[in-house]
Image: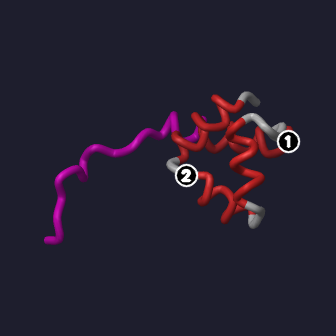
Amino acid sequence: MTPERFSECLLHIRWTPINLASALQCDLSWVEALEAGNAKVPEGLAGWLETLAQCHEKAGVPTTYRGRGHD
């Protein structure tokens, strides 16, 4: 997985590197190294991120609720 695709997956999932580090319970510095291309994304992590990103890409975001307030 390229650093660009790694970042793109996080965008689709709507996660920051901090969110991913929290989910994985790992060091933020390692996630930042993955994002910068200074460390290789492990195959298992790449596959998991691709699955999540593709699910989010396919599902999209509902627009029905835009502008809704507290009723």
Q: On residue 3, which mark appears? A: none
Residue 8 in picture, x, y percent from top left = 58, 34
Q: On residue 42, which mark appears? A: 1
**Gap between marks 2 and 1, in whole Å?**
18 Å
Q: Which residues are magenta?
A: 54-71
Residue type at mark 1 is Pro
Name the residue: 74% across, 42% down.
34
Above or below — where is 55 with respect to 25? above
Residue 54 in picture, x, y percent from top left = 60, 35
Name the residue: 28% across, 44% down.
63
Residue placed under numbered mark 2 in the picture = 15
In the displayed orientation, state which residue is furthest to the bottom. 71
Check residue 68 for magenta coloring. yes
Check residue 61 for magenta coloring. yes
Name the residue: 62% across, 52% down.
17
Residue 16 in picture, x, y percent from top left = 56, 52
Instruction: Please state, as top left, top right, bottom left or bottom right, where the C terminus lies in the image.
Output: bottom left
Give SS at disc 2.
loop
Left or right: where does residue 11 sit relative to residue 36? left
